[in-house]
Amino acid sequence: MNLKSFEQVFTQTVKFFEWLLAGIIIVAVIAEGTMLVHDLFSYIMEGEIMEKFQDFLAHALLYIIGLEVALMLIKHDMTLVMDIIIFAIARKMIILNVHMWEILVGILAIFILYYLKCYGLSCRFFPNRP
């Protein structure tokens, strides 16, 4: 077996395992998501929605990050890495009890990441610069 064919086999094997891992993540998020919706309905029926909403939001945002990771494994797009980091920062700011300066740093970090995403990599949300 020459080096060129070994590289092709190795690349195809890695891609297969990336797709397999992405599929496992998607199945896990769907399974956990259905249980989360069931829990949400039970919170509403028991009148505990105000007490449990932060837990619900923490899990929902974690599932969104999981889906973005699965998408990144499939597409290999640099903008998806930025999206994952933005969602992770936003989740930390929303869920954890943080100080005001940490919220400001998080807002600044999200702004920088959006700027880099739009003007450093590609722009999806703002018009192209002249």
Image (cartoon, rainbow, N blue to C red):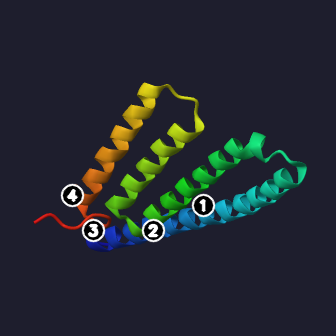
Q: Give the SS element for disc 2.
A: helix
Q: What residue does disc 1 label?
A: 25
Question: As drawn, is 105 to the left or to the right of 4?
Answer: right
In the image, which is nearer the foreground, mark 4 or mark 3? 4
Q: Residue at x 25, y 52 (%)?
A: 116
Label 1: few (<14), some or many (≥20) within 10 Å? some
- For marks 1 and 3 on the same chain, the one whose residue lies earlier in the sequence: 3
The reply to whether dot 2 and dot 3 touch (C-beta < 8 Å) is no
Residue 5 position by quadrant? bottom left
Q: Residue at x 33, y 39 (%)?
A: 108
Q: Which residue type does callout 4 highlight?
A: Tyr
Residue 103: x, y in percent? 44, 33
Q: Residue at x 70, y 48 (%)?
A: 56
- For marks 4 and 1 on the same chain, the one whose residue lies earlier in the sequence: 1
Q: What residue does disc 4 label?
A: 119
Q: Which residue type does callout 2 highlight?
A: Ile
Residue 54: x, y in percent? 67, 42
Residue 27: x, y in percent? 66, 66
The reply to whether dot 2 and dot 4 touch (C-beta < 8 Å) is no
Label 4: few (<14), some or many (≥20) within 10 Å? some
In the image, which is nearer the foreground, mark 1 or mark 3? 1
